[in-house]
Image: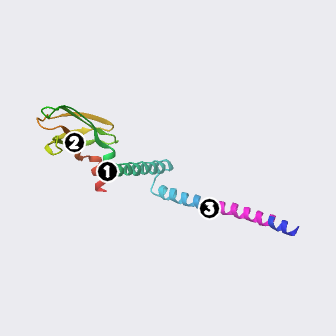
Amino acid sequence: MNIHRYQIYLSLGAIVFLICGTLVFYFILDAVRKQSFAEGFAQGKTAQQQIFIAQTKSKENERLRYLQSVKQNWQDYLFIANTRYATNAVFGTIRDLNITVANESKITFESVKVKVEYIRSDGSLYDTEYLSLSNLHPDEHFTTPAPSKWRGSKVKASIASYESKALAEVAER
């Protein structure tokens, strides 16, 4: 019977200890919050202003993390979505070439340079052209024509370079 009472007292003691620990933690956390708000009040800011500032900083940090992600993984956001063209198998010409560039990000790319390689039927490179696009907006797919070539059977297109003011801001920080 004494062992059973001892276990009950031990269980009650553990519960009281947990409750007291939780209360102490809550009071410490509350004191830290009050001190933070007190510092804000000392600077002449109301509670609403402090909350607004905290939310603004949080949104800015989220935006900077997104921009950093786009900068590091730009190929996932800016890419060649489609190349359509007609060929003449007999003469080896490429005509009616249209290249679609996709911007799947939330930012504008002020300048995008596309590299277009014309490949001969034997696999060797025949010619290279560069196309310049301006102001590719968020979630935009832009199709542009490319020059026809008298020699070539395939086309390979890729993003050669890009410029974005938003991503330049990340580089400065």
CA separation in Å, label 3 and label 2: 62 Å
To which residue does mark 1 refer?
71
Disc 3 to disc 1, C-alpha distance: 41 Å
Q: Quadrant of the N terminus?
A: bottom right
User: Mark 2 sits on what residue?
Assistant: 156
Earlier-in-chain disc, 3 versus 2:
3
Between 100 and 107, the one lying in front of the other is 100
Whether residue 9 appears in magenta in the rendering, the answer is: yes
Q: Quadrant of residue 144?
A: top left
SS for callout 1: helix
Quadrant of the image occupied by residue 3: bottom right
The image quadrant of residue 151 is top left
Q: Position of residue 67 (x, y in %)?
A: 34, 49
- The total of numbered circles placed on residues is 3
- Identified by mark 1, the residue type is Lys
Q: Which circle's residue, 2 or 1, is located before the other in the chain?
A: 1
Q: CA distance from mark 2 to mark 1?
A: 24 Å
Q: Residues within 10 Å of mark 1 (few under 14, many from 20)?
A: some
What residue sits right under mark 3 in the picture? 25
